[in-house]
Image (cartoon, coloured by chain):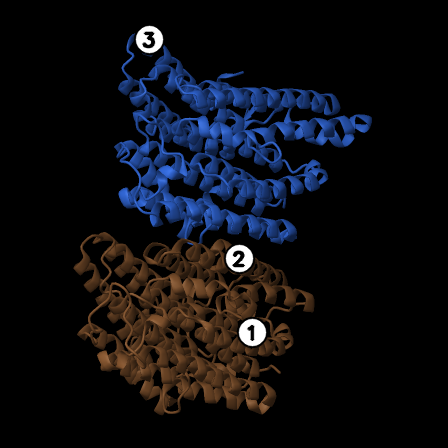
Amino acid sequence: MSWMDLLALTPQLILVLGATTLLLGGAWFPAPRPLLAGAILVALLAALAAGTVPPPVPEISALFHATPYARFFTVLWCLLGACGLLISVRFVMDHRLPAAEYVSLILFAVTGMTLLSAASSLIGLFLGLEAFTLAFYILIACRRDCDLSAEAALKYLILGAVATGFLAFGIALVYAASGSLHIPEALQGLQSAGGMRAWGFLGWGLVLCAVGFKISLAPFHLWTADVYQGTPAPVAALLATGSKGAVIAAVVGMMMSGAPLWRDMSSLLWVLAGLTMLAGALGALPQTNIKRLLAYSSVVHMGTVLVGLLPESRAGLTATVFALVVYVLASLGCFSVLASLADQRGEPQDFADWRGMGRRYPVRCSALALLLLSLAGLPGTAGFMAKFAIFHAAIQADLIGLALLGILASLISFAFYLKLIMLFFMDEDSTSARSSGSVFEHAVLAVCTSAVLLFGFFPAPLFNLIDLLFP
Amino acid sequence: MNAMTTLPQFPWLSLLIFLPLSGALLCLLHNGRDSECRWLALTTALATFLVTIWLFVGHGQHDPQGWLLVEDRAWIERFGIRYSLAMDGISLLMVLLTGLLQVVGVLLSWPVRRQSGLFFALLLAMEAGLMGLFLAHDLVLFYLFWEIALVPMFFLIGIWGRERRRQAALKFFLYTLAGSLCMLLAIIALHLIHGEQTGHYSFLISDLLHTRLSTAQEFWLFAGFLAAFAIKSPIVPLHTWLPDAFAESPSVGSVDLTGLLIKTGIYGLIRIAFPLFPIATAAFLPILGILALVGLFHAAWSAYQQEDIKRLLAYSSISHLGLVLLGLAAWSLTAWQGSLLLIVTHGVTTGALFALVSMLHQRTGTRRLQQLGGLWGQAPCLSALFLLFALASLGLPGLANFSGEILVLLGTFKSHPVWAGFGMLGVVFAAAYMLRLVQGILWGEAQKTPGQYDPVADLTLREWLILAPLAIITVWLGLYPAPLLAPLEQPVLLLLGGLP
């Protein structure tokens, strides 16, 4: 590793050094406010560094990319981390959590996400994935007095361990078959692998399983609802957006190398995408807990995003990244509403708690309704442009069947989002007063809502930016 | 006459969309201050209506492409989506009707107190959506407005509706959405096929007209569009969402549903589905004719059996729409002019009837036919107007609906005498349920429901303001519909051209 490599790693270095400093500093100065402020500053600084300091080398030690694509996601996850910390402020103070540990874990998780999105080798992929997964094992359980959190953390830990096993074994097989851990060569090497080709396929299949666990593709999605339910909203916000988004970003990165492997696996991906969209939509219908609903909604979205990968076209990849960004915005907004309503009793999760909430808190509930409708894909919101772009790419590639499945899933999705929206606008007021939220939570919500509206009517800037990322 | 040409650059069409939209935003900002919201909404609706009248009076001639006014700007260039609005005689008529009925709607909703800012904001947002829908010339823009018009209605029914409002709202939304999602797929597919053929990726209807499609492609795409329009119109087996939505919605909701929202389906057929897919259309027209007749009779029969006046009127709307669809299926200038005129007159007369029913409901607390009666003795003006609109609705010569109905039947008779015969019979059915309604409400013993009441009060000034203009329009269009028919001729001929 040369100085050039280190320079290219600046954002990650800022995150890691910042996290360590805060962790150690917290031992002497445990006051939560300065620690949270410091962490937000670190995340913003890292985003700034990633956005402004041009990397001197395109690839770092054959492990991570330093391309515009990787940098885009570095900025995105750093900003996401900053938003996550903003909506954590009240949570950390109310529950008297050890702030130093909390903020440093979030920063470590963000580091993991940035590394994963930039992975150019299977080792990089493994490192990035494990880095943020480890942080999440602890973060999910950070409320030690809550049984649901403990259950969620245990579930995530066990399934995470299984996924890690799949991933490690898969990587070993791929290496055995192709003789390389660098992703482009590993993909190309498969073609000349001869008798080892089948093992290579199995290896990629296992990697896909691990990916499936992480982004909850059906049939690997069953943990999602339970884990979300037990996870505090600020952490769940990162879990739902960053942890899945980073994996998708890594997969898109692999797709960009355009190897024939994907064509061989396309029927498998087809089935996975269709199954995931339907399983998510049908799973969401009977839910009576808003977090479980959001969990299944994320399952549907991951299925939809997968549809964007199938056409193997530039348009498809652009649409995928666009949809990913929009999903991150809308999801983050939803969880920030939840965080802003949370008080000592926890967050209002059950549908019963949401009856008439719109009468009591019209602004936040209207924003939430808008975000939910964006998740559903209502025209005029960014969610529609995302779905439009994805189905556009899918139909262009003659994936009519998948597009029809997607439409069906959209219809079912509208049903469950609308049921929730009706609950808080159309039922009589029976909720007790909730927290009025902190200014930070409101700020994050405002940013997400306005971005969703803005990109709904003027998606061009974001599309143009994403276009720049693909060489 | 053509002041328009002196100001060709002024975006009149955008004004029709953004005026109500800004009114909606203002109402939202004034949420909680009832009287300000009401006046704001009324001013906006009136201003918009005045613009539509101005366009109607001052419109010039259709240009060679068949448009009166056009606006076209780039919007999302990546997908070739344009912000493209165009108005011809048909859109002009629909826009005029929208402007009129929204003024009626605001006046009708004057007593709304609960969250009135939100209420009027939704009402105006829906107006913006409808205006956009009737003017859009780009399919994605059309789809956008199609959905934007849907959402406010969902909330209007769901928040201010009656007991079973939630189910009705959800049913209404999901039914319509199922159709529109199919349409969305068809739109994208058509766009891509056209793009591959010409290299020019566009969503403009005028561009897509020249797409070469195989028969199978054409049928599938037509089916996609038809799903959306048939559910909205509604064409008969797909109408089951409508009575619930009508019955549960607040009074203004019923007026807008009957006058405007279900007309969007017809408009979509005329403007998009028929011209884009001529071969599929030609094959579909006989089926449409039969479905129209089935709808005409089935709905009339159902209407006759209803106890709830609103449901009765809901079914009568489906029945009238059957006649409109029959006219479309006949595919001739006269029949189409009749259908389009009937769309407007039906909007006015049935809208007025729904308004009257809500006034009656406010006074008596019931909408059941059995519990009403003897109104004539207590509220003669209200009763007289009720009678007028009911007679107009059943097609009495000299009143509005008659002109439309007779044109439809004449136009149909030329090509399909049997259809016309059945259509005529359907008009008789309309007389049956309408007279039953009139008889039940106006004559007979004055009924007293529990918890009621003083003699029913007659019309207030506000109610006169709603009904009197509608009554004048009803009589005027019955006697002299020519001003509305004239601007229709050229676009209808253009749309009918080159087909069976």
Between B295 and A81, the one lying in front of the other is B295
Which image quarter is the N terminus of chain A in? top right
Q: Which one of the lettered chains is coloured brown?
A: B
Residue B160's image quarter? Answer: bottom left
In-image side of A144 versus A319 (left or right):
left
Identify which residue is drawn at 56% across, 85% down: B422
Return the mark for residue B321.
Answer: none
Residue bearing the label numbered 1: B274
Residues under numbered marks 3 and 2 in contact, where contact means CB atoms less than 8 Å apart? no
Query: Disc 1 is attached to a residue of which chain?
Result: B
Residue B63, visible in the rendered structure:
no
Between B254 and B385, the one lying in front of the other is B385
Cα separation between marks 1 and 3: 74 Å
Please name the amino acid that badge 1 sits on: Phe
Identify which residue is drawn at 42% across, 72% down: B312
A78, above or below B499, in the image:
above
Residues under numbered marks 1 and 3 in contact, where contact means CB atoms less than 8 Å apart? no
Residue A168's image quarter? Answer: top right
Between A64 and B306, the one lying in front of the other is B306
B353, above or below B198, in the image:
below
In-image side of A304 versus A11 (left or right):
right
Q: Which one of the lettered chains is coloured blue?
A: A
Which label sits in the foreground, 1 or 2?
2
The secondary structure type at the circle numbered 2 is helix
Residue bearing the label numbered 3: A27
Which label sits in the foreground, 3 or 2?
2
Residue bearing the label numbered 2: B178
